[in-house]
Image: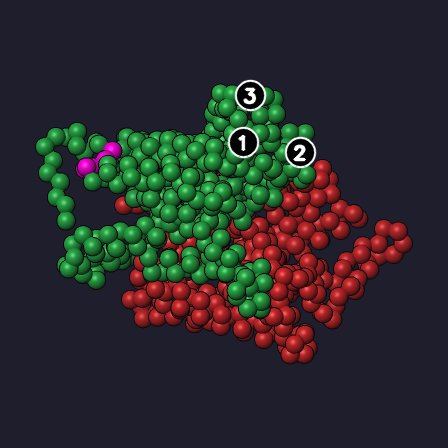
Amino acid sequence: MQFLQLVISGVAQGCIYGLIALGFVLIYKATETVNFAQGDLMMLGGFLGLSCMVVLGMPFWVAFLATLAVAMLFGMLMERALLRPLLGQPAFTVVMLTIGIGYLARGLVTMIPGWGTETHTLPVPYKDEVLRLGSGGDALVLSMEHMVVIVVTALLIAILFLFFRYTKLGVAMQATSQNQLAAFYMGIPVRRINMLVWGISAAVSACAGLLLAPITFVHVNMGFIGLKAFPAAVVGGFGSIPGALVGGLIIGIAESLAGFYLPEGFKDIAAYVLVLVMLVVLPNGLFGDKMRKKV
Amino acid sequence: MRFLFKTHYEQDLELFKHGGQKFWYGLLLLALAAAPMVFPEYFISQLVFVWIYSVVGLGLMLLVGFTGQVSLGHAAFLAMGAYTEAYLQQRGWPFLFSLASAAVVAGLTGIVVGLPALRVKGIYLSIATLAFGFIVEEAVTRADGITGGNSGITLGSLEIFGLPINSETRFYYVSLFILILCVLGVMNLMRSPTGRAFVAIRDSEISAQSMGIHLARYKTIAFALSAALTGIAGALYAHKLRFISPEQFTILQSIELLIMIVIGGLGSIYGAIFGAAFWILAQQLIVTAKDWLPPAIGQQTGLQPTIFGIFLVAVVLFEPLGIYGMWLKMRTFLEIFPFYRKGMFRRQKSYMKSERLK
C-alpha cells in the first residue's frame, strides 16, 4: 500500500514536470530554441491565479481559465516583442535571452504589491480533502490535490492531442515544426504559428503552476521546479511530446521513491543523476528521434 | 588610424601588436599597482572581487565564448576550488601547492563533466552541466566531514613564503598577480593550435571535424581548462570571504556568472574583465542608490535581479558583443573620425541552422 501511495504522489509530481517539459518541447519542436524561462512562466501562472481569486474574487474554475488566457497572451507578446527580432541569430543568443527573461521575471515579481517575496496559499475548493479507497489499516489515502493534478493533466493532454491531430491549426503547427520552409511555401504563416506556439506553451506552464500551487504554495522560487523539467524532457527525448510526459512521470516517481527508500538528500538529486545516466547511456532519450546533421 | 606594416611573421605572434599598446598597458599596470596607495580600503576590497570574478569570467569565457559550449554549472567548479583550498589549508599545505591542487581538482572534475561531451552536444551538454551543478551542491552539503556541511567552513589566515597576507592591500596584489598570469595564459592558449581548435569548434563543429579536430577530446580539454581556471578563482574566493558554505555555490550563482560574461561581451578576454567590473560596480551602485531612492523601490529585494535582467535582455537584443562591443564601437568612432558609418558593426543575419536535418 505504501509503495502504491508513493507511486501515486510521484505520478502527481511527475505530471507537473511533464507539463512544464511539454512546454519546452512544444517550443523546441516549433522554433528549435530552448526556453529557460519556462519555470518562471509557471510561477507567473501561480501568481496570476492568486490575483484572480484573491483580488478579483473569481471562483476557482473561472480564475483557472482566465489565468490560462492571460498567460497565453503573455507568451505571445513575449515572442512578438523580444524573440522575433532575434530570428536568425545563433541558438545561444536566444537561450541567453530566455535566461534573462526568467531572471528579470523573478526580480519583477517581488516588486509587485500583493505578490512580493512571501509564500501565498491558493484557496482552491479541494484543499486538504482526501479520498479513501478500501477500509481498515491499509486503506489507500489519496489527497485530492494529487488526484486533481493527474486528472487535469490527462484532460489537457487529450485536448492537445485532439488539437494537433484534427484541427487545421494543429496540423499547420505540426507541418511548421517538421519543415519551416516547406510549410511557408504551402502558405502557412510560419511566424504567426510560432507566436501561437509560444502562447500555448505559456498557457500549459501556467496550468502546471496552478495545479502545483495547492501542493507547494505560490512563491517566487517556484520557478526552480522548471529546472527539473529539463531532465524530464531529456529522459523522454527532447523533441517528443509523449516523451515529455513519460519523462516527467519517470522523474516524478523516481524522486518519490528515492525520497523514501534512499538516504536523505537523494530526493533532490534523483532527477539529475537519472538524466546524467540517461545522457551517457541513451543520449536521444526514450522517444527521441535520431538526429544527424548533414552538410 | 594606425596601419601596421608587417615585415616579419613573428609580428603576428607578438603579444603586443605595436608600441602604443605597450605604452597603454604599461600605464594601466602602473595605475593598478598604485591604486592601493590612492583609494580607500573599501574600494580596494571591491577591486579584489573584480579580479576574482575576472578569473572566473576568463574560465567561463574559455568554454562559452571561445569553445561555444554553454555551462550552467560553473558554480560547482568554483565550489571545488574553494573547498579544496579550505581543506588543504587546514592540513597545513603551503598556499602555492594548495592553489595548484585546487586547480587540478577542479580541472579533473571538469574532465568528468566533459565526459558526456563524448556523446552529446548542444543543449544536452548544458543540461548535463546543470545536473552536475546540482549534484555537487548536494554532495557538498552532505559531506560534512570534509566541507562542514550547511554550517560552512572558516579559513585561516593566508601566508605566502612566510609573508602573512593580512591586509586588503596585500591580498589585492596577490589576486592581481594571479589574474595577470591567468590572462597571459589564456592569451597564449588562444594563439596555440589548441586555442584555434576551440574557436573552430565554436564556429562550426562540422567543419572543425572535417579538418581533423577530435571534437570530444578538445571539448573535454576546454572543460578541464575552464574548470581549472574557475578552481583557482574559487581558492581566491574562499580566502577573500574567509568563510564558505554551500549556499554560495547554487545554480543561481552559475546563471549569474553566465549573465556576467554575456554582459561583458562574449568571445574576448576584455569581455570577461569588463563583465566582472560591471557586475561588482553595478552591485555597489545599486546599494548606494538604495539610500536616495524612494523606499517603495529602494527597499525591494528584487531591485538587483530586475536591473541585471533588463541589462542582459538589452545586451542580447541590441549589443551582442556587450560592453566590449560598446568600447570597440567608441574606439573605432574616434579612430576613423569622421568616417564612422552606422552599419559598420551590423550583425549578420543567417537562415536558421537546423540541427535536425534528417
- Residue carrying label 3: B93
Kind of element beneath mark 3: loop
> Is residue B307 in view?
yes
Q: Mark 3 falls within which chain?
A: B
Viewer-nearest of discs 3 and 2: 3
Chain A: give its colour: red
Q: Between residues B314 and A38, which one lies in front from this camera angle? A: B314
Kind of element beneath mark 2: loop
- Residue carrying label 1: B166
Earlier in the chain: of badge 1 and badge 2, it is: 2
Kind of element beneath mark 1: loop
Question: What's the residue at 26%, 51% (across, down)?
Answer: B328
> Is residue B113 in view?
no
Q: Give the chain coloured green.
A: B
Question: What's the residue at 57%, 25% (across, down)?
Answer: B88
Boundaries of the magenta span: B15-19
Q: Position of residue B3 (x, y in %)?
A: 12, 44
Above or below: residue A190 compared with residue B184 = below
Discs 3, 2 touching: Cβ within 8 Å: no
